[in-house]
Image (cartoon, rainbow, N blue to C red):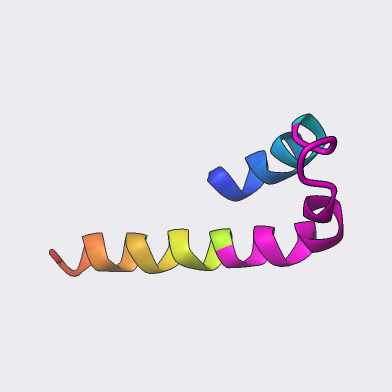
Amino acid sequence: FFYRLAPVLALEMKEVYPELKKALANVEKVLKREEQRFAQTLDQGM
């Protein structure tokens, strides 16, 4: 879910954090992986 918000955030914050645009693909990948790991943790009952 949150990884899909990364492009919107990068666009909104481009003036303050121009490096977000360059790192966007990596940010999305990391966020998605963390969400998947969190879901696995919940499935296992923490």
Q: Split into 4 quadrants, where in the image is the N terminus?
A: top right
Q: In percent of the image, x 56 and y 60: which residue is there?
A: 32
- Of 21 and 7, which appears nearest the observer? 21
Image x and y of residue 19, in percent: 82, 55
- Corner quadrant of residue 4: top right
Judged left or right of residue 35, residue 30 is right
Prevailing SS of the magenta stretch? helix
Q: In percent of the image, x 55 and y 44: which residue is there?
A: 2
Judged left or right of residue 21, residue 29 is left
Q: Split into 4 quadrants, where in the image is the C terminus?
A: bottom left
Q: In percent of the image, x 85 and y 48: which residue is there?
A: 18
- Of 9 and 28, which appears nearest the observer? 9
Give yes or no for residue 33 being in the magenta stretch. Answer: no
Image x and y of residue 43, in percent: 23, 63
Q: In percent of the image, x 65 and y 39: which residue is there?
A: 5
Q: Residue furthest top?
A: 12
Relative vertical location of residue 1 with respect to residue 38 in this rendering, above or below = above
Judged left or right of residue 39, residue 28 is right
| Number of numbered callouts drawn | 0
Image x and y of residue 24, in percent: 77, 57
Magenta residues span 13-30
- Corner quadrant of residue 23: bottom right
